Image (tube, coloured by chain):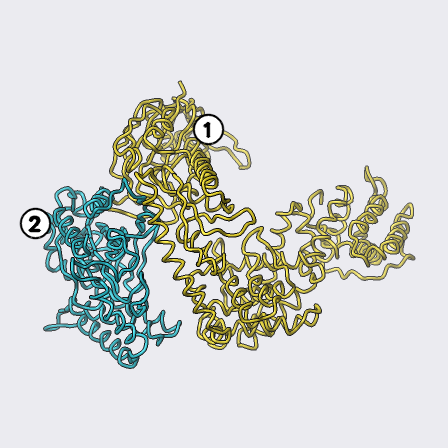
Chain colours: A cyan, B yellow
Amino acid sequence: MYLQDLIFTLQKYWADRGCVVEQPVDVEVGAGTFHPATFLRVLGPEPWNAAFAQFCRRPSDGRYGENPNRAGAYYQFQVGLKPSPLHVQDLYLDSLRAIGLDPAAHDIRFVEDDWESPTLGAWGLGWEVWCDGMEVTQYTYFQQAGGIDLMPVTCELTYGVERLAMYLQNVDSMYDLKWDKNVTYGQLRKPWELEYSTYQFEELQPAISFASFDTYESECKRLLARTKGGEPAPLVLPAYEFCMKASHAFNCLDARGAISVTERQRFIGRVRGMAKACAETYVASRARLEFPLLPPHLRAQAVAAYRGAGEAGVNASALAAARAVAPHAEEITHAG
Amino acid sequence: MPADLLLEIGCEEIPAKMLARQLLDLPALVEKRLADARLGHSGVRALGTPRRLAVIVRSLVDRQPDLDEEVVGPPVSAAFAPDGSVTKAGQGFAAKNGVDPASLAKREVAGKKGLYAVALRSVVGQDTRGLLPALLADVAKAIAWPKSQRWGWSETTFVRPVQWLVALFGGEVVPLVWAGLTAGRQSRGHRFLAPGAVEIANAERYVDALREAKVIVDPEVRRDVVKAELSRLERETGLRVRADEALVGEVIHLGEYPVGVAGQFDPAFLEVPEEVIVTAMRTHQRYFALEDASGKLANRFATMMATVVKDPVVVQKGNEKVLAARLSDAKFFFAEDRKKSFADWNKKLDAVVFQAKLGDAAKMIGHKVRRIEQVAAQLAVGIGADGSLVRAAAQACKADLASGAVGEFPELQGVMGRHYAKHAGMPAEVAVAIDEHWWPKGQGAALPITGTGALIALVDRMDTIVGCFAVGLEPTGSADPFGLRRAAIGIWQILLSRPDWAALWTPLFEASRAALAEQGVELKNTTALEEFFRSRLRGIFADAGIPAQDADAALAQEFRDPVDARARATAIARIPKEAREVFKRVANILDDARGKQLAIGDTVDPARFVAEGNVEHRLHAAVREAQAREVDARKRRDYPAVFESLVQLQPTVAAFFGGSGDKGGVMVMDPDPALRDNRLALLQGLVRPYMEIADFRKLGGAA
């Protein structure tokens, strides 16, 4: 199976099970979790099922295109199922069958791997899924994002596209993967890896990235604090975009070795501060829009519960809205 | 009729360590709930796999026994009005206990004054069947996990999403409702080998029914299977599995149906140190290492699949590929690291925080390394160690933390340092000391063998403890995030293993304190730290089987020399009960006198011995004789001999106080202050030499 067919198959598989097939976010991110379709959509009471491939940048993992398993950028296939259906494991195993990994021929295991993102103020419990000892998927039940308790819970499946393809094509280096029948992964990606490793490790100018980080952070704050006619009028989606960009600037500085250990914690804290502020503002904005993705007949009670808990803060309000509609869970869409 | 009870909670994959813990904890939880519900049984056992946690109660009674009980309520004065009628409070109490207010009795209650209203309750035992749904739901809710989660829209929290429930009492379904599920008799078979429902007739059939569905639910049977599979692979490969009980203990909880498979890796990787290969295999992949008859690592491994596959070679090849990638990384790091120098790494450590609270002048690992070097070099003089070796080892001891290999495999700290030090041509003692300064790595683990390693190990740990205490990071309750208790135990174990160094604690502590103070970290109060060290030593003595009282008596006097403290604590066992009691009595009399602000002098004036029967003279003489005969034993610190001498004093002391039956004897607290003070001085002279060895007031027996 060509690498692009792997992506097509997963897209089709999850589309058939109720997922919106989104497209990758057009901002540098380190993981599909940063995509607004994950990080923002997991918040609040609205259902959301999405699947998409995401180009992810990890500057520190750059190896000048010389390591067969590690690179400064790679692809994740990301699935978010909110609420997590009770049969996610079965759905997931069927997706492996769909791409040609037969569990009867392989040793498939769910091995504990709890997930935490200090920059996103997010954590969840789950596993790394092993196929014959190789990690092929990160499987996480999100419990918190941006410091907000999540209800309903989103199940996030992150397939390592290259690893799965290496397995299916039986090659030892990701650069030997066939993207389609004519082009290899190496032909497509190796020049990028070489140039970007050189840039990230040798040429990147820390002063520029430091300045960008400060700019992104102040823009993020300004957009969240925006008012119109004396009333709060935040622009949370652009604000979150600056949070993503700041996170990438930090990753670049980290890879360049420009941030000391102590400074590192402070930068992570600054990104987390942005992520939390965006998360809270986003939930409030969805409430103002009256939770449009809930079934029409449940929206009013969710909004009433959200406003009723007003004084207790966004976290309590979001939980109240979810609890108001939870008894009607069967009337709300879920994947599968 | 009593019958067996089964509860099975079907769950998505439970982490191995948490499952292992729960298999130990769950029976006690169930026993507690059954006891609270007054339901008798003949035993509780937990079973489980990653996908299910189960408990079986044998011969559970089918009905609670009837119960007659007396519930004590308010005092009669509150429960009854003066005219004898029941007050509001009395009626409330009666209603709460479901009895007629007219039936309230008036009783005396042990330990209380006056009469109390008492409700005489007669509770008819209930049917077990009716109690079980709520009881089992309580059990499920009370199962404690280190981390738990919610899922979907559910409010339930559990280690992972709950998938099904089976609850059977004597073959009948218990209608337990929990986690949005209702219990039935349908369990599930192996995810791949026997997907679908498995009907469970009753608890007795549970293990076998699952076995037929390719699930080995008894963890001990899985252990046997894993061991048998490892033996099979040993036979097939002609090699030996390197013993690793901890890994076996984890692997049995990684699947419901373990099947072994062996694989190999490129022998070229064997140029990487064995520890790196074994760690890469063990911690990342849970593979067992294989070795030849001479114990040399082979380029083979063994692993357990969680299922039976069509062709094990496919799985073998897959695992080999993963391991090859990991070993190439390891080989890469090992090669890159050998191009670096210890100086490069130490420079990096100047920018790595050890403990931020120590402040800017002391917080980096680089600062710590300099303190270790300073203190170790200072102490080396006193113990006759080679100062230049000690300095070299101290400078190098943390360097490998900045190496690539330790970054990838943190558990190899010290081990990699040893390899790199050898490669760099450092003396063997220095290379070994780098490794050994992390020892002991756990309870019962090996202690440093080289003197240099042991010294650095002591200094490093003391530095951490003093530094943390100085900035208020001492352990509280069960929380010990910086491992200070383990560090203190390590210090004691090393000192106890080296009698020549027994007196090293004080100089070690003082030098560490001074080195930290030079970097601006002042430990102001030493009491808490000393008490902390004393408690750790008490724990070590308890583990060695020394009675707690004896340990307390010895440590109350002095703890800094652990070898001496241990000798004193063990010698106390030589003192018979009568002697302990009489000395404890003397010590208490002296305490009382001090409590009354009496100054107790050192000089005894025989001219003031006036008591009948010359008991004072005799005791005075006996004390002097004892002191004379103990001179040698005390010099040798032969505490058993000192205490044997003490035992000889006991009849004379007893006679002083009047012996048995209280005939005659001396009243110490004589109304004449001169006589009284003289007697107190005599008693002080008697006990003081022994109190220096053990505080008799801490010993049991009559006061």
- The image shows residue B227 at horizontal and vertical percentages of 47, 38
- For residue B683, side relative to residue B13 (left or right): right
Instruction: Please tell me whether residue B670 is drawn above or below residue B254 in the rendered image.
Output: below
Instruction: Please tell me whether residue B626 is drawn above or below residue B255 in the rendered image.
Output: below
Residue assigned mark 2: A296
Residue placed furthest toward the top: B1
- For residue B642, side relative to residue B334 (left or right): right
Badge 2 amino acid: Pro
Residue assigned mark 1: B43
Q: Could you say whether the residue bearing mark 2 is in a helix, strand or loop?
A: helix
For the point 85% across and 54% down, which residue is it?
B630
Q: Nearer the viewer, residue B47 or B259?
A: B259
Residue placed furthest toward the left: A296
- Residue B426 in view: yes
- The image shows residue A114 at horizontal and vertical percentages of 33, 53
For the point 29% across and 40% down, which residue is it?
B162
- For residue B187, side relative to residue B338 (left or right): left
Q: Chain of mark 2?
A: A
- The image shows residue B366 at horizontal and vertical percentages of 50, 74
Classify mark 2: residues with Cα within 10 Å, few (<14), some (14-19) or many (20+): few
Q: CA distance from mark 1 to mark 2?
A: 55 Å
Front label number (1 vs 2): 1
- The image shows residue B33 at horizontal and vertical percentages of 41, 34
Badge 1 amino acid: Gly
Badge 1 and badge 2 both on one subunit: no
- Residue A307 in view: no
- Picture quadrant where residue B167 is located: top left
Marks counted in the figure total: 2
Classify mark 1: residues with Cα within 10 Å, few (<14), some (14-19) or many (20+): few
Q: Nearer the viewer, residue A62 or A250?
A: A62
Q: Chain of mark 1?
A: B
For the point 23% across and 64% down, which residue is it?
A186
